[in-house]
Amino acid sequence: MTNRAISIIDDDGSVRAATHNLVRSLGYVVHSFASAEEFLQSPHLNDTSCVITDVRMPAMSGLDLQAHLLATGHRFPFIFVTAFSVESDRARAMKAGATCFLSKPCDGEALIKCLETALTPNGAAASKNEPIRP
């Protein structure tokens, strides 16, 4: 059992619940949020080891969340999962240091591999050269 906390942010409740259950089954502490704003206002921001987020959400997007966190000095791995895979979104996410950019429906094994990469020392840097895009 690990004490690493993973924060899942997705406005789709069923995707959020499925991702939460998968990540929790791996032994991680999981916090789930329906929006980027909810995550930013939570007490779990500073104990997060990795963010798994949707790209397109009402109000603040996952990409805007990543940019905001980087600008405020929060440096932890990001895994993006989206139903609307747009190359410019993927390029922006990866340029900002995302570990992975996955398309919905997301394969559980691909997400697990991304999470393992993200939580490995220098994992984000290693995957930046070879992004995982199932």
Image (cartoon, rainbow, N blue to C red):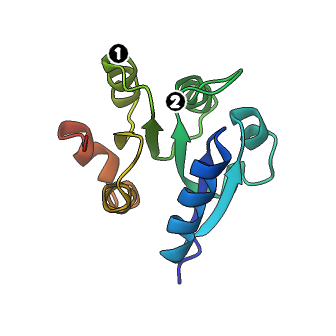
Look at mark 2 in the image and give the residue it sits on.
Answer: 55
Q: Nearer the viewer, residue 38 or 76?
A: 38
Amino acid identity at mark 2: Val
SS class of the residue under badge 2?
loop
Residue in the picture at 60% in, 25% down? 61
Residue in the picture at 69% in, 35% down? 36
Q: Nearer the viewer, residue 16 or 80?
A: 16
The spot of residue 112 in percent (x, y) is 37, 62
Q: Quadrant of residue 107?
A: bottom left
Residue 122, placed above or below residue 64 = below
Look at mark 1 in the image and give the residue it sits on.
Answer: 88
Instruction: Please rate how many residues cluster around mark 2, counting C-alpha atoms within 10 Å: few if below 14, some from 14 to 19, many from 20.
Output: many
SS class of the residue under badge 1?
helix
In the image as oriented, which residue stretches furthest toward the top?
88
The spot of residue 52 in percent (x, y) is 52, 47
Q: Quadrant of residue 49?
A: bottom right
Residue 16, placed above or below residue 68 = below
Asked if the residues shown at circle 2 and circle 1 are in contact, with their CB atoms under 8 angstroms apart, the answer is: no
Which corner quadrant holds the C terminus?
top left
Amino acid identity at mark 1: Ser
Give the total of numbered labels.
2
Residue 37, placed above or below residue 6 = above
Q: Nearer the viewer, residue 111 or 107?
A: 107
